[in-house]
Image (cartoon, rainbow, N blue to C red):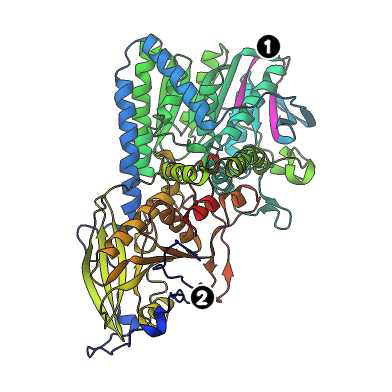
Amino acid sequence: MIKRNSKRVPALTALLFLLLNTGYIGAQMISPEINSRVNLKPEEEDLSVLTHWVKWNNPGSMLLHYLTKETVIHYDRRSDDVKKLTTAEDWLVRQEHVRKKLTEIIGPFPEKTPLNAKITGVIKRDGYRIEKIIFESFPGYYVPGCLYIPEKIRGKIPAVLHVIGHNQESFRGELYQVISCNLARKGMMVFAIDPPGQGEHVQQYDPAVKFSSVGYSVVEHNYIGNWCFLSGYSCAKYFIWDGVRAIDYLVSRKEVDSERIGVTGFSGGGTVSSYIGALDDRVKVSVPCSWATAGKRLLEIKGVQDAEAELYHGAVEGISFEDLIELRAPKPTLLTSVSRDEYLCLQGAREAYDEAKTAYRAFGRTGNLAFVEDDSKHWLTPKIRLAIYSFFMKHFNLRGDPAETEADILPREELTVTPTGQVATSVGGKRIFDLNKEFSEGLIEGIENSRKNNPDHLTRAVEKARILSGYRLAGNLKGEFVINGKYQREGYTVGKYALETGADYAIPVLLFMPDSVRGKYPAVIYLHPGGKHTDAKPGGQIEQLARNGFIVAAVDLAGTGEVKNTAGREHTEGFTAVLAGRSIPGIRAENIVMVANALGKLENVDPEMIAGVGINEMCIPLIHAAAFSNKIKAIVLAGPIVSYRSVAMNRDYRIGFNTRKDGGYWHPYEVDFSWGVGGALTSYDLPDLIAGIAP
């Protein structure tokens, strides 16, 4: 329990959430006068608020629409800037700007250290051999891969880094073997490596289940991505650096022509190969497949992808996927797309290609940019695979037939690089958690030093929290409750209200009002991650408050309850907010302050006695709201995370509670970022905000 220093502010107990220390209960308790109207049974009550509203008939997409609209404004502003570029000189200036921004967003890359590469096995096949390689992209951080080497090498040959998409087996999957095999037979050395979270490179590997403790590749990517977002950068840094160091290994081979380096990847591999092709000047030819898209269209049609595809504050910094293509101009680049892609939109791919053409045209090299489209779902079709082989052969000056040959598909076990099939259980070493922990410890030390040495630390921490969380409320607040129904219960009523915010969404509220309200009474804002209805049943905790004389507003904060996201995958809202320089806790804090402001205008509410109760994940926005606004006079936190530091410093972090069917509880692994503030650990942590609220 936390309260502000005021004689009129009551304290709330964690058990019953009642204001006890003022003597309010007992001396001034309301006698529940039974209303003569017939009470409905709980199963006959419909506690949804927006169901019958025409204006708010899309509650499940309300928050995502709001965030998308705001993010698109940044993308449109970027597009306007790009349209002004006409000459090669214009584009060179733009490229330098984008390169600098990407370095800031992704985070500075470290100094290169010895790769300590080892060959753990060799497989001889028809027309090529496979060397099993493991190397260190960071000291003690191991990356496994397989190197396809053509037979009968004459002179130096080109080499291609093959970056893998979201296949749990990684390059051992049949499609990836087909491509690596064919590129090798056509005269290219091919290095296929395991991305983090896949193949033998699982980050959260649990020997007990012989798999990741959190889930398959996308889930792990989001899980580790959350650590990085808290510390103000994108986990793309690690995916990219593995690729850059893999190229270092390729150019160290005596067979490789360092002037003929290529990179290709499909799906998630297309994303990472586009980063590498844009940021590593050694890449002459880049072929990112089923990836190219306009950032605006991706948001509007499919929604954001997983964490390594999202650049920290990318949209607000004016960076989009198109920039990764244009940063390569005028180097040879092939983009591919399909007509029925489940994850990426065809319109976005076409628009990205059209915009990139203007850059290549300015350099007089339109022939170096190509686009191939096929009629298919998310896949590398035979037509696209032929285009890949042909493009590399053309720009590497390789002779021969580009037609695909039948590949030798090996079982997963034969392509295993490490003795146990997992880096974690064979060579051990560091994982992304450890690398991020080392980085974050420096940030945390900075916060601790500020606490010790800066007398204005708390004031500055709150101000930085406002900025980083994207909290925007200031000055006179607008918004009033609009009623859309009411139920009579024994001793109190339940009003169904929408609080119109002036933005493109409304806040659903259930207002519990004791029957015999006379004078001014305390109010409680009740926040549950399951939504306003969770504790609203007769006999529940909210009823206990109402029967003891408290006006209670049970609120569906943005993205919860009946406004819980149904328009995209579970991580969509949090990652979209990161792109736009916003956060879900910041937006929810705005919601809380708006509700407090509207409550304070009610005739029977004492505006000096408004408290908040946060359950589990809802504690985070409540802490922010109370730090940002003095309209919240006291808060109770039930089941909060201790700090963002505790997330960054723990390999297995968990946020909140879920109720099992048997009545027990479990802590779900979090793969979204609805609880996090991007960059928080660069300036503040939750205890700073709590200290700012106290006493």
Q: Is residue 670 above or below residue 347?
A: below
> Closer to us: mark 1 or mark 2?
2
Residue 240 visible in rendering = yes
Residue holding disc 1 = 156
What secondary structure is found at the residue carrying circle 1? loop
Q: Mark 1: few, some, or many residues within 10 Å (few <14, many ≥20)?
A: some
Label 2 is placed on what type of residue? Leu
Compared with residue 347, is residue 302 higher up or lower down, i.e. above or below? below
Distance between the alpha carbons at the discs numbered 1 and 2:
74 Å
The magenta-colored residue range is 143-161
Q: Position of residue 322 (x, y in %)?
A: 40, 27
Our reading of the magenta stretch's main secondary structure is strand
Q: Which mark is residue 15?
A: 2
Which one is earlier in the sequence, the residue at label 1 or at label 2? Answer: 2
Q: Please report the residue visible at 46 percent of the width from the left and 70 percent of the height from the top.
A: 11
Query: Residue 264: horizontal and vertical position, in percent?
Result: 55, 27
Q: Amino acid at mark 1?
A: Lys
Q: Which mark is residue 564?
A: none
Residue in the foreground of this view, choosing between 220 and 287:
220
Q: x%, y% of residue 5?
A: 45, 61
| 624 relative to 122 in the view: left or right | left
